[in-house]
């Protein structure tokens, strides 16, 4: 049985047990909630080393700095811009749909009273004055910035000096992936332990807004593809959007069914090379990089779910806090590809960046597979659009004349 199925069963089981315990919620909070708390502590334990090691490896994978300055720079710039737009779409839909409005699950007073700094302070605080202090405090934006500096700087060193550094963090990243896999294997029990007391104290009505979450994420993915990718390939690559989507449909379908950007990579490379005429060099560089750092669909999902959790707990997110979500989800997307349960892990990181209760992530854990299919599909479509656009700007796109916009 797949992990996502087990998580869904854990969610349903928690709802049923919670419903049965609505008359005695203290049983759920005393005997079941500790299992959920333990799962959250395990998640918190891995966030900092996981993000640090993954981001350093992701930044270092860009390779030669001269290559980064041209093809690499355009590729990363495109990925980050489209990811930021995706988060904005998610936040807009989260505000429009209001999936968690009206429920108002109580939170600790210190959480409810927490306020984010101004937008200027938020931007300045991205650069840590003491990186080690940022690591200790779990300041996600500072950790991301420091890791990017380390990863890029390591590529500028002679191989005998930079390679051992990169190898160490590659090993650390692999160790953290293994630990993450173990923790995610406990997710069904963790979700059960988190959901049961929530339903017992608030009733099953708390899960009804999840339908709105699914609709918002799927609508957001469709809008992102129709507005962002269509406009980009039409204006920059001069290709009909309809033909583009038809050309990369094998990759999109594979991504939707497997929920794996890395697993879809061979299909993505073949689709852009054979159907769109992207050169070997661009395809082999842009697409693997995209599978590592491009997470448009996942970032959009973060925006929707962060608003959902905030509304669920009756917390208002001001402009600075929503800007923090955009920055954290955009920059954090670089280090989450290829990680089992990446969307769930990334969501906890985003929630933590603005002081939202991590317990809210459990509510979307049971429907993660449904959401993962859409967000992985849009991730892969974003990868293929980037390869097409970068190839066009480099003069390495050889699309049949019949599909070019005249």
Image: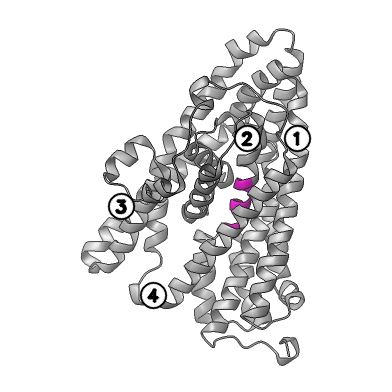
Q: Which residue is mark 3?
A: 168
x, y percentage for residue 143?
Answer: 37, 47
Q: Residues within 10 Å of mark 4 (few under 14, many from 20)?
A: few
310 w.r.t. 14: above or below: below
Disc 4, SS: helix
Q: Are marks 3 and 2 in contact (CB under 8 Å)?
A: no
Residue 209's tag is: 1
Would residue 126 appear left or right of 290 to someone viewing this image?
A: left
Disc 3, SS: helix
Q: Quadrant of residue 191?
A: top right
Q: What is the spatial separation of the Cα atoms under label 1 and label 4, in whole angstroms? A: 45 Å
Q: Which residue is mark 4?
A: 69
x, y percentage for residue 27?
Answer: 64, 9
Q: Which residue is mark 2?
A: 309
Q: Earlier in the sequence, mark 2 or mark 4?
A: 4
Q: Residues within 10 Å of mark 2 (few under 14, many from 20)?
A: many
x, y percentage for residue 384?
Answer: 62, 70
Disc 2, SS: helix
Q: Residues within 10 Å of mark 1 (few under 14, many from 20)?
A: some
- Residue 177 shows up from this direction: yes
Of circles 3 and 4, the one toward us is 4
Q: What is the spatial separation of the Cα atoms under label 3 and label 2, in whole angstroms? A: 36 Å
Q: Quadrant of residue 258?
A: bottom right
Would residue 107 appear left or right of 17 to someone viewing this image?
A: left
x, y percentage for residue 256?
Answer: 71, 57
Q: What is the spatial separation of the Cα atoms under label 2 and label 1, in whole angstroms? A: 11 Å
Residue 210 sits inside the magenta stretch: no
Q: What is the spatial separation of the Cα atoms under label 3 and label 4, in whole angstroms? A: 25 Å
Q: In which quadrant of the rendered image does the C terminus lie?
A: bottom right
Q: Earlier in the sequence, mark 1 or mark 4?
A: 4
Which span is picked out in magenta?
A: 295-303
Of circles 3 and 1, the one toward us is 1
């Amino acid at each position: 049985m797949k992990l996502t199925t087990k998580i869904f069963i854990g969610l349903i089981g928690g709802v049923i047990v919670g419903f049965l315990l609505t008359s005695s919620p203290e049983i759920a909070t005393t005997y079941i909630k500790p299992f959920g708390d333990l799962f959250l502590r395990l998640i918190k334990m891995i966030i900092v080393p996981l993000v640090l090691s993954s981001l350093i490896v992701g930044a270092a994978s860009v390779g030669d700095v001269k290559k980064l300055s041209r093809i690499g720079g355009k590729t990363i710039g495109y990925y980050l811009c489209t990811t930021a737009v995706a988060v904005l779409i998610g936040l807009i839909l989260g505000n429009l749909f209001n999936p968690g409005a009206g429920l108002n699950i109580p939170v600790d007073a210190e959480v409810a009273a927490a306020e984010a700094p101004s937008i200027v302070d938020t931007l300045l605080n991205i650069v840590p004055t003491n990186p080690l202090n940022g690591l200790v405090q779990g300041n996600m934006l500072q950790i991301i910035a420091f890791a990017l500096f380390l990863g890029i700087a390591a590529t500028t060193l002679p191989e005998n000096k930079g390679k051992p550094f990169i190898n160490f963090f590659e090993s650390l990243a692999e160790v953290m992936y293994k630990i993450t896999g173990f923790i995610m294997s406990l997710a069904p029990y963790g979700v059960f332990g988190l959901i049961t007391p929530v339903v017992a104290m608030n009733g099953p009505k708390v899960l009804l807004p999840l339908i709105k979450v699914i609709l918002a994420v799927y609508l957001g993915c469709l809008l992102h593809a129709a507005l962002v990718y269509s406009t980009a390939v039409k204006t920059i690559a001069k290709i009909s959007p309809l033909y583009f989507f038809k050309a990369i449909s094998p990759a999109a379908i594979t991504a939707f069914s497997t929920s794996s950007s890395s697993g879809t990579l061979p299909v993505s490379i073949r689709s852009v090379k054979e159907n769109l005429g992207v050169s070997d060099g661009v395809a082999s560089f842009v697409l693997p990089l995209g599978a590592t750092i491009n997470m448009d669909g996942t970032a959009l999902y973060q925006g929707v779910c962060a608003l959902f959790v905030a509304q669920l707990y009756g917390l208002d997110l001001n402009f600075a806090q929503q800007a923090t979500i955009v920055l954290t989800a955009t920059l954090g997307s670089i280090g989450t590809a290829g990680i089992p349960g990446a969307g769930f892990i990334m969501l906890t990181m985003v929630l933590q960046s603005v002081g939202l209760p991590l317990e809210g992530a459990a509510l979307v854990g049971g429907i993660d597979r449904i959401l993962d299919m859409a967000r992985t599909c849009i991730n892969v479509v974003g990868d293929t659009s980037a390869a097409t656009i970068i190839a066009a700007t480099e003069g390495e796109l050889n699309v049949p004349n019949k599909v070019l916009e005249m």
